[in-house]
Amino acid sequence: MQFLTKNEIPVQVSVKTTINGADPMELIVFGRYYQKEKAVYLQYEEVLEEVGTVRTTVKVSKEDMLILRTGAIKMRLPFRLQETLKGSYELPLGAFETTTTARKMDYTDHGNNSGRIEIVYDFEMQGSPAGTFHLEILFHPDHSDE
C-alpha cells in the first residue's frame, strides 16, 4: 500500500487509446494527481497479464508533456507540439528507440482536482511508423472510500 503525500489527491483515471482510428482501448484505474512547480502530474498503475505491473506518470507543463512508464515495461515518450522527439521503449526482450510527433496536445483543468489530457501523435519505433495514436485521459477525485 502506498501512502499519499499531503499534496496528492486520490483520483479515478479513465484512459482511452485509439490507434489509427480503430476501436478504442479503455482502462479505468485509480491513481494520484498533484501539482509541483509549474507542472501537473498524474500517476496510476495497471496490471498487464503477460508482463506484470506498469506504473505510469503523465507530466503536463505549459510547453510539453511526458509519459513515463516503469516496472514490467519501461517507456519514455516526450511530446512537444509539431516537434519530433526521441524516446525509448524497453521490454524484457530488448530496448527500442522511438519518436513522437505531437499533432495535438490539450490539457483542460475542470477544477476540483479533475481534468482532461488529450494527445494526438504519430509514433515510430526503430524508425518505422507504428501509427497515429489518440490518447485521452480523464481524471476526477476518487470518493469511493468516503
Image (tube, rainbow, N blue to C red):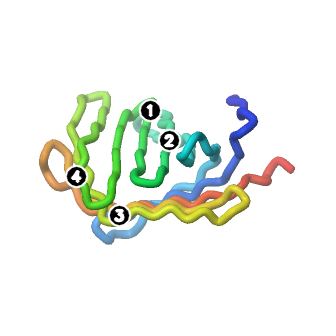
Position of 100 with respect to 16 (left or right) is left
Tag on residue 57? 2
Position of 77 with respect to 108 (left or right) is left
Q: Earlier in the sequence, mark 2 or mark 3?
A: 2
Q: Earlier in the sequence, mark 1 or mark 2?
A: 2
What whole-number distance in Å separates the C-alpha atoms at marks 2 and 3? Answer: 18 Å
Q: Earlier in the sequence, mark 4 or mark 1?
A: 1
Q: Position of residue 122 (x, y in %)?
A: 25, 59
Q: What residue did someone put label 4 on?
A: 84
**How dense is the environment of label 1, judged by Cα within 10 Å: few (below 14), some, or many (20 and up)?**
some
Q: Earlier in the sequence, mark 3 or mark 4?
A: 4
What whole-number distance in Å separates the C-alpha atoms at marks 1 and 2? Answer: 9 Å
**Picture quarter with the N terminus:** top right
Answer whether labels 2 and 3 touch (C-beta < 8 Å).
no
Q: In this rendered view, identify the residue nearer to me: 74 or 104.
A: 104
What whole-number distance in Å separates the C-alpha atoms at marks 2 and 4? Answer: 21 Å
What whole-number distance in Å separates the C-alpha atoms at marks 3 and 4? Answer: 13 Å
Answer whether labels 3 and 4 touch (C-beta < 8 Å).
no
**Kind of residue indicated by mark 4:** Thr
Q: What residue did someone put label 3 on?
A: 120
Tag on residue 70? 1
What whole-number distance in Å separates the C-alpha atoms at marks 1 and 3? Answer: 22 Å
**Kind of residue indicated by mark 3:** Val
Q: Residue at x 44, y 32 (%)?
A: 70
Asked which quadrant contains residue 17, the reply is: bottom left
